[in-house]
Amino acid sequence: MDTILTLYSREYCHLCHEMLEELNSIRNRVGFQLLVIDVDADPVLEELYGEWVPVLMHESRELARYRLDVPAVENYLYSISGGPV
């Protein structure tokens, strides 16, 4: 089963763009699918996240907010997939 991470983001957010770039780099090393959701496209998500983006989630677990700790996310992904840690 493929791991699906969700990035809550907005179009005009430079931190969101940075996190997306870092996640794309990680995807070259650790396989996962990435779903990018623009919180401004959904009033409920806009209310929920406000300016608290980017937020990276795996199911109900928050993996990152604002900045991505690349080694921590890679280790988490390996731990749930049984790969190298």
Image (cartoon, grey):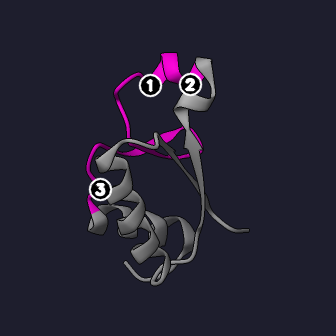
Q: CA distance from mark 3 to mark 2?
A: 21 Å
Residue annotated with mark 3: 68
Which residue is labeled 1 in the image? 49
Which of 61/47 is in front? Answer: 47
Q: Residue at x 28, y 43 (%)?
A: 66
In the rendered structure, does residue 33 fall within the stretch colored magenta?
no
Mark 2 secondary-structure assignment: helix
Looking at the rendering, the stretch of residues picked out in magenta corresponds to: 44-69
Percent from the top left, x then y, of residue 7?
50, 48
Q: Earlier in the sequence, mark 1 or mark 3?
A: 1
Q: Position of residue 48 (x, y in %)?
A: 49, 19
Q: Residue at x 54, y 29 (%)?
A: 40
The answer to whether residue 40 is left or right of residue 84 is right
Kind of element beneath mark 3: loop
Determine the residue located farthest toward the front in the rendered image: 12
Earlier residue among tags 3 and 2: 2
- Callout 1–callout 3 Cβ contact below 8 Å: no
Quadrant holding the C terminus: bottom left
In front: mark 3 or mark 2? 2
What's the residue at 47%, 66% (across, down)?
77
- Please provide percent x and percent y for residue 43: 60, 18
